[in-house]
Image (spheres, helix red, strand yellow):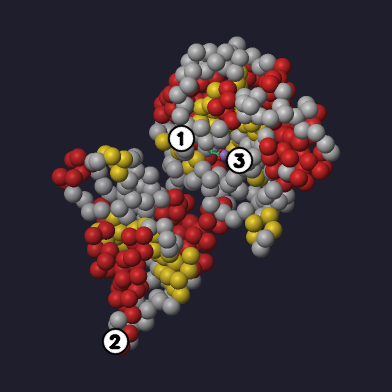
Amino acid sequence: MIQNKPLPASEYRRRRRQLMRMMGPGSIAILPTSRLAVRNRDVHHPFRPDSDFYYLTGFAEDDAVAVLIPGRKHAEYILFCQERDPKREQWEGARAGQEGARKQHGADDAFPIADLDEILPRMLEQTDRVYYAMGCDPELDRRMSSWVSQVRQKARAGVSAPFEFIALDHYLHDMRLYKSRSEIAIMRRAARISSRAHKRLMRHCRPGMMEYELEAEFIHECITSGARAQAYPAIVGGGANACVLHYVDNDQALRDGDLVLVDAGCELDCHASDITRTFPVNGHFTKEQCALYQLVLDAQLAAIEQVQPGKHWNAPHEAAVRVLTRGLVKLGLLKGQVAKLIRDGAYKRFYMHRTGHWLGLDVHDVGDYKIDGEWRILEPGMVLTVEPGLYIAPGEKGVAKKWQGIGIRIEDDVAVTKSGPNVLSKDAPKTIEDIEALME
Ligand code: GLY
Ligand code: MN
Ligand code: MN
C-alpha cells in the first residue's frame, strides 16, 4: 500500500499570502485553470490543472478561476467553480461546489463559474492594478478586456477603472522557483517512483522486445505506485533511435548488442520527475559503449558537483562540456586543442542540447535563467535536471563505424541545498557495474 500525501492546505495558503504581500492593496490577481482539451469527438484528454493556478489553489477541477484581492475585508481569496449538479455528477464524478471550495479548499468565498461575467467587473471597480497572465487563454483575454471597458463606462458615476496591468507570471514564476521542504519531499517521492520504474524495465529488458514494452513496464510501476500521470511522453529509443532527441514512436524492436535510451518520469500531485538512463539491451556494455558511457557519466558527475549555492546556472553545463570535449579528443572523435574546441562549440556536433532545466510543477519548469543578462546564481530550494549526453548518428562523416548509432544520455533530478547537490533520483542505477549487476 503506497501513501502519496498531497501538499497540505496550509502550503497553498502560505503561497497566496506571499503573493498578496507582493501585490499590495488596491490590486487584484485573476488566474484561470486549464481548459479541458478534446482528444477526438466527445472524448477528452485527462484533465490536468494549470500549474500556476494549482500552485496557488491545489484545486484540481476544470472550469475554475481564482481571484486574489489583498486587503479586501469580506474575502481575499475567491474561487469561481462549477456548481454542484447531482445529474452531471452521476456521470462525471463529484464536484466540490461553492461550499466545498470554502470548507475544503480554503476559499474565503466562492461563486458559480457561470456568474463570472456578472461578478468580476464589480471586483475590478476601485482596483488600481490587475495581475493577469495575458496571452495564455485567448477567450479569457477577450472577456477581461470587456470587463475593463464595462468599468470604464462607469467613469462618470465616479467609478475608477484599473490603470496598471502587470504580468502575474513574472512574480509567480519566481516564487515557483524556490521549492519548500514539503514540495521537495513530493518531488523526491515522484523521483523515487520513477527510479523504481527505471529499475523494473532494466530487469525486464531482453533483445527482441519492442521499445513500447519497456514503456509499458515503466508506466505499470508508476500507476501501481499511485502516480497515474506521466510528466511528459516517454522516450524509449533503441540503437540509433537514441540519437533522435525527442523520439517518441517507441515502436521498434530492441536489438542484441545495442544500447537503449529511456527518458521517462512520472508526475505526482502535479509535480514532475524527469530521469534518463541508457543501458545495453542484453545487459552487457561493449568496449565502445563502455568508453562513451563512462565519458557521459564522468561529465554528469562533474556537472552535478557544480550544483552548489553560489555557483551560477551555467556552471554545470560548462563542467559537462569540458569533460565531454576532453574525452572526445582522447577517443579521437574530435581533433584539436580542447580550449579552442570548446570556444568554437565543436562538441555540439555530438552534444547539441544544454545540460539541464528547472524542474517543478512543469517538467521544463518556470523561472528565469538569466537576470539582467547574467546567469542566475543557484540557491537552496531550486531543483534542476542534470542531463549531458552524446549522440553519434549513423553515417556521421569522418567518424569510425564503431561509434556510429550510439546515443547516450544520463539525467538526474537535483535539488540545491546548503550542503550541496541532493540527487532526488539517486535510486536509479547509473554506473556500469550497477547496471550490469541489476540486469544479470
Ligand atoms: N524529458 C524532457 C527533458 O529531458 O528535458
Ligand atoms: Mn530533462
Ligand atoms: Mn528527460
Residue 393 image-quadrant placement? top right
**Label 3 CB, ligand 2: below 8 Å?**
yes
Residue at horizontal 66 percent and vertical 29 percent from the top = 396
Question: 48 above or below 138?
Answer: above
Report the residue marked by disc 1.
233
Residue 433 image-quadrant placement? top right
Q: Quadrant of the C terminus?
A: top right
Q: Amino acid at mark 2?
A: Ala
Secondary element type, mark 2: helix
Secondary element type, mark 3: strand
Q: Amino acid at mark 3?
A: Thr
Report the residue marked by disc 2.
157
Seen from the viewer's position, the closer of residues 216 and 60 is: 216
CA gap, disc 1 and disc 3 = 17 Å
As drawn, the label of residue 385 is: 3
Looking at the rendered image, the disc whose residue lies closer to the viewer, 1 or 3, is: 1
Residue 411 image-quadrant placement? top right
